[in-house]
Image: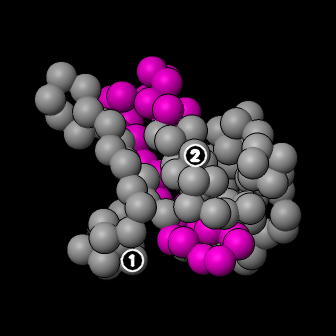
Amino acid sequence: MEAWREELRITPEALARPHGIACVDGRLAGFYTLAPAPRDWELDNLWVDPRCMAQGIGRALLRHALQAALDGGAMRVRVDSDPNAEPFYLACGAQRTGSVSAPIPGEPGRVRPQLAFDLSGNA
């Protein structure tokens, strides 16, 4: 994680875009940020504190994010997913659209799944 600190840092610019947070007992439990575009928005962050996983927080944040994108005019929300998060997104209705090579030390064949939520039927 330390090697990715800068890449994973949430900037003030990211928080100026559509975003949401979830709190449990007054503590930050998770958040998301969206990157708007004319048709296809990107869910560029969705994080849940590991101590708060399996409580429905990720699903609630994702529902909120997808509704925010739909309200903003998005037809689709793309996700450049961590491989470990792919099952979550697929269970929530995402479709896999491809993958990109993302090798890391010890995992030269690692790929990041490319996913999308189609919002066009929800308008």
Tell me, yes or no, if residue 3 can be seen here: no
Q: Within 10 Å of the Cα at label 2, are there few (<14), some (14-19), or many (20+) other Cα atoms?
A: some
Q: Mark 1 to mark 2: distance in Å? A: 27 Å
Looking at the rendered structure, which numbered label has been put on residue 7? 1
| Percent coordinates x, y for residue 41 in the rendering | 62, 68
- 66 or 3: nearer the viewer: 66
Quarter of the N terminus within the rendering: bottom left
Q: Secondary structure at mark 2?
A: helix
Tell me, yes or no, if residue 72 can be seen here: yes
- 111 or 26: nearer the viewer: 26
Q: Residue at x 24, y 74 (%)?
A: 12
Q: Within 10 Å of the Cα at label 1, are there few (<14), some (14-19), or many (20+) other Cα atoms?
A: few
Q: Amino acid at mark 2?
A: Gln
Looking at the rendered structure, which numbered label has been put on residue 67? 2
- 42 or 49: nearer the viewer: 42
- 53 or 36: nearer the viewer: 36
Magenta-drawn segment: 35-60
| Percent coordinates x, y for residue 94 in the rendering | 76, 47
Q: Residue at x 50, y 41 (%)?
A: 64
- On the rendered structure, is 61 left or right of 80? left
| Percent coordinates x, y for residue 75 in the rendering | 74, 62
